[in-house]
Image (tube, rainbow, N blue to C red):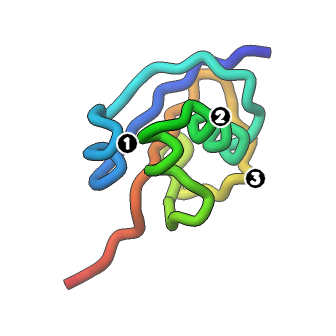
Amino acid sequence: MTRSIQLRYFASIRESLGTGSEALQTTATTVGELRDELIARGGSYAEALARGRAVRVSLNQTMSDESAALPDRAEVAFFPPVTGG
C-alpha cells in the first residue's frame, strides 16, 4: 500500500537538504523504514539522516520513535536534538 505523507525538516537538517518540506509517496510502514528510504536517496539525505547521527522525529506533531506505524496522510518531521543555553 502506498502512503501519501508530508515531510518537514528543521534546523541543520533543513539547511543540509535545502528544503523545509516535501510531499512523498512511500510504501514504508514505519517511521524507521521511511528514514531508511530517505537515506537511500544518497547525497545530502544520506548525510543529514545517517544512522550514526542523532535525529529526532515527530509523527503527526507527537514525538515518536522509529518503530511507530506510518499511517496514510501522516506528517513526519525530522530535526536534530535541541540543546538549551
Residue type of the residue flagged with mark 2 = Glu
Distance CA(mark 3)–CA(mark 2):
14 Å
| Label pair 1/3, CB-CB below 8 angstroms | no
Q: Quadrant of the C terminus?
A: bottom left
Distance CA(mark 1)–CA(mark 2):
15 Å
What residue would you read off at disc 3?
67
If you read the primary sequence from the N terminus, does the residue marked by circle 3 or circle 2 appear first?
Answer: 2
Q: Label 2 neighbourhood size at 10 Å, few (<14), some (14-19), many (20+)?
A: some
Where is 25 relative to 50, above or below?
A: above
What residue would you read off at disc 2?
37
Distance CA(mark 1)–CA(mark 3):
19 Å
Q: Residue furthest front?
A: 43
Residue at (28% x, 53% y) in the render: 11
Q: Position of residue 3 (x, y in %)?
A: 67, 19
Residue type of the residue flagged with mark 1 = Tyr
If you read the primary sequence from the N terminus, does the residue marked by circle 1 or circle 2 appear first?
Answer: 1
Q: Which of 38 and 58 lies nearest the eye of the viewer?
A: 38
Where is 7 relative to 56, above or below?
A: above
Is 2 displayed left or right of 80 in the figure? right
Q: Quadrant of the N terminus?
A: top right
If you read the primary sequence from the N terminus, does the residue marked by circle 1 or circle 3 appear first?
Answer: 1
Q: Position of residue 84 (x, y in %)?
A: 26, 81
* Labelled disc at residue 20: none
Where is 84 relative to 4, above or below?
A: below
Q: Label 1 neighbourhood size at 10 Å, few (<14), some (14-19), many (20+)?
A: many
* Labelled disc at residue 9: 1
Q: Position of residue 45 (x, y in %)?
A: 47, 40
Residue at (65% x, 34% y) in the render: 37
Answer with the quarter of the image where residue 15 lies. top left
